[in-house]
Image (cartoon, grey):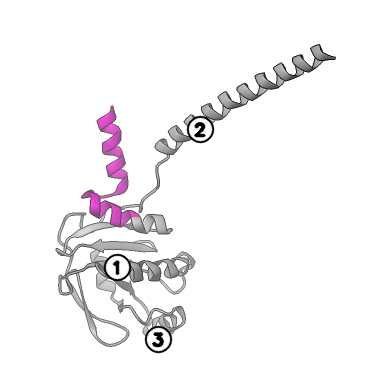
């Protein structure tokens, strides 16, 4: 009886030690995987003004009436242009996120919504979506200047009037990647990660 108990205890200890080794190996693999599959930033299309170049400057009337200067340093803050459409489901999903970011980052960031099309449709959409606290402009020329081909698309313009980040955005992480790129002084988070990989190699 005693021998059987000793043998079973020994087997259990072997199993426990094996599990510890497996957990350690898995933890290490997860770390490696996380490093290889880095967070995906905004998908930057190589069209329109490049990051680091001066933004096209516009003085545009908003749906509310007053004009807003786009690409100019009248407020001393950065501008986040968000190109959207009332029929774009991903755009609608991002609206609460954008409003939250606008509130928390209002010290240095101004949020501007941009689109084109039928004015009454956008006025109705702005009211229903609760966007009346932010400038909302309709301008085909603005979209053409930034070569916006797909939505939702965001452009971050720095306090100096230069493009600091841009790209297709589908999540909070991709929007915030524009801010990270600005702070890191790179065109995109992907460029920063590629530089790190090159430095290690």
Frontmost of labels 2 and 1 is 2
| Percent position of residue 191, x then y | 28, 43
Determine whether 141 is above or below 17 in the image.
Answer: below
| Mark 1: secondary structure | strand
Q: Which quadrant, please, contains the N terminus?
A: top right
Q: Residue at x 25, y 31 (%)?
A: 199
Q: In the image, which disc is placed on residue 120? A: 3
| Percent position of residue 189, x then y | 31, 47
Can the viewer see residue 31? yes
| Percent position of residue 120, x then y | 40, 86
Q: Earlier in the sequence, mark 3 or mark 2?
A: 2
Q: In the image, which disc is placed on residue 81? A: 1
Assign the magenta stretch its main secondary structure: helix
Q: Earlier in the sequence, mark 3 or mark 1?
A: 1
Residues rendered magenta in the picture: 177-201
Q: Residue at x 39, y 84 (%)?
A: 123
In the displayed structure, does residue 110 sit left or right of residue 13? left
- Spatial CA distance of label 2 from label 1 is 40 Å
Q: Earlier in the sequence, mark 2 or mark 1?
A: 2
Can the viewer see residue 168? no
Determine whether 191 is above or below 5 in the image.
Answer: below
Quadrant of residue 61 in the image?
Answer: bottom left
| Mark 3: secondary structure | helix
- Spatial CA distance of label 3 from label 2 is 55 Å
Camera-side residue of 4 and 121: 4
| Mark 2: secondary structure | helix
Q: Residue furthest right?
A: 1
Quadrant of residue 14 in the image?
Answer: top right
Q: Which residue is mark 2?
A: 27
Frontmost of labels 3 and 2 is 2
């Amino acid at each position: 009886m005693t021998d059987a108990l000793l043998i079973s205890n020994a087997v259990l200890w072997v199993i426990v030690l094996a599990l510890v080794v497996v957990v350690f190996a898995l933890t290490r693999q997860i770390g490696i995987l996380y490093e290889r599959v880095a967070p995906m930033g905004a998908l930057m299309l190589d069209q329109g003004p490049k990051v680091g170049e001066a933004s096209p400057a516009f003085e545009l009337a908003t749906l509310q009436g007053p004009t807003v200067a786009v690409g100019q340093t009248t407020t001393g803050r950065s501008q986040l242009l968000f190109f959207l459409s009332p029929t774009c489901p991903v755009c609608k999903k991002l609206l609460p996120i954008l409003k939250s970011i606008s509130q928390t980052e209002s010290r240095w960031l101004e949020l501007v919504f941009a689109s084109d099309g039928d004015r009454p449709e956008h006025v109705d959409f702005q009211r229903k979506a609760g966007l009346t606290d932010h400038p909302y402009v309709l301008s085909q020329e603005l979209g053409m200047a930034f070569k916006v081909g797909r939505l939702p698309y965001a452009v971050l313009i720095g306090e100096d009037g230069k493009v600091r980040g841009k790209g297709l955005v589908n999540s909070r992480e991709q929007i915030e990647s524009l801010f990270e790129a600005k702070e890191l002084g790179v065109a995109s988070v992907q460029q920063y990660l590629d530089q790190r990989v090159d430095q290690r190699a």
